[in-house]
Image: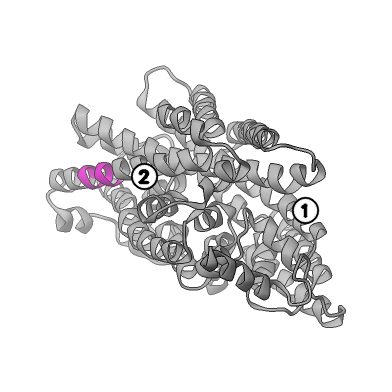
Amino acid sequence: MAIAMLLSRRIRTEDDYLVAGRRLGPGLATFSIFATWFGAETCIGAAGAVFESGLSATRGDPFGYTLVIVIVAALLAVPLWRARITTIGDLFRQRYSPGVERFAVLLMVPGSVLWAAAQIRAFGQVLAASSDGLTASAGIALAAGTVLVYTAFGGMLADAWSDLIQGVVLVVGLVVVTALVLADAGGPFVAFAQVPAGHFAWRAPGESMLEVANRWAIPIVGSLAAQELISRIVACRSPEVARRSAWIASFGYLAIGLLPVALGLIAASGGTVVDDPEQVLPALAAAYLPRVGYVLFVGALVSAILSTVDSCLLVAGSLISHNLVVPHVPSLTEDGKLLVARIAVIASGVGAWGLALGSDSVLGLVEEASGFASSGISVILAFALFSRFGGPRAAAASLTAGTLVWIAAHFVRPVPWDYLASLAAALGAYLIVATIEPRHRGHGDHREEGVLEVRDVAHEEHARA
């Protein structure tokens, strides 16, 4: 809260608020990228899933999201930075049309709000598990109110600095707690030798290869176009900083992400009893650690959750304000744009609070956030960055087909390969419509050459500056 209030004095423009003035250095960028997804689903959801079902239940964390950051570092970081965008909606406007921009943003906002709801629910669970007499509903309300205030004031700059501080707390806390738990259990070999053999299986009993592929595709493909990560990339001060920071963050994400997984396995071997698997880590800490260690552990959990939920709310607010509201009110001053962005963040937080109260699972919220509309977004992002094939009609068809098929396969007539079906539909619709669509030359100042030349011109201008 103090960081947000202090840094809010340095926010003068919409760019300052949404992308930290595009001046993040290697340290801030690395921890901010690391903290993008290292939150509730890693510390609460994945550990609880491993405790209940074994390693077959954890594809996204830490493995899937680590691969996402690796792909971004290797392929996407530099072209995204050179596009000089504020949100991914800007790229879709440049490459396709303002209509595609608005359509994509309307599909992306629910995903960010669902992500925020997952973090808020996890925060409430931690507070409820750590306090006497505090219900989960009251904890969720307290969590939502706290995060809303400091996110609305501080924007991306405060988000990056709090990510740095919270990241240090998280790394130290999880390392110390894991070491204490392993020592109390008699060492890592003794602890893991007692884990039921079925918990080490890489797929669940009776799970087909198609189902395994679907479970992997959700976090990987579904998160490549996540604005939460893209906003960190474009906020870096150079493309080299963006790429290098993403590489370092990917290694850190995997290393630290394995610790909650290990603790979940140890809990399964030690006979830990909890009413809700998502509370296994607080329960494990309370059983194994002295009071000081327990406080440290809960502090690490809260840090991980806070570093993700503020990112989600800021992304939802930025998409609403920058891509939906501001373009229709050209007379807005910079102060007006800032006010619109902050109101959008608050509105997104209220929506996330309502979803958190009505949900039964953190991992359920995360899977729905990753699956909803992301197949079409990822398809049109790939064509926007690396190809001139297809135009606005192909992009709109891809978004529509991917979303409708996912809704049908996930809710109407559920199938275990719902995301793969939506991805195939999104790609197929794009290719079919692009084949019959008149050649599209792009939208914007450089429409004759397309988005690749727009990116090159922006990079040359930055180099001259």
Q: For mark 2, what is the residue?
A: 164
Location of residue 219 in the rendering, given as x and y in whole percent from the top left corner: 53, 60
Residue 214 place in picture, x, y as percent: 57, 67
Q: Is residue 290 above or below residue 42?
A: above
Q: Nearer the viewer, residue 302 or 438?
A: 438
User: Viewed as shown, does residue 364 lie left or right of 393?
Assistant: left
Q: Does the magenta segment cover residue 264?
A: no
Q: Earlier in the sequence, mark 1 or mark 2?
A: 1
Q: Is residue 54 left or right of residue 461?
A: left
Residue hosting label 1:
102
Q: Which one is in front, 45 or 341? A: 341
CA distance for labels 1 and 2: 33 Å
Q: Which residues are magenta?
A: 171-177
Q: Quadrant of residue 306?
A: top left
Name the amino acid type tagged 1: Arg
Residue 394 in the image, given as x and y percentages of width and height: 80, 71
Q: Position of residue 454 (x, y in %)?
A: 67, 70
Image quadrant holding the N terminus, namely top left
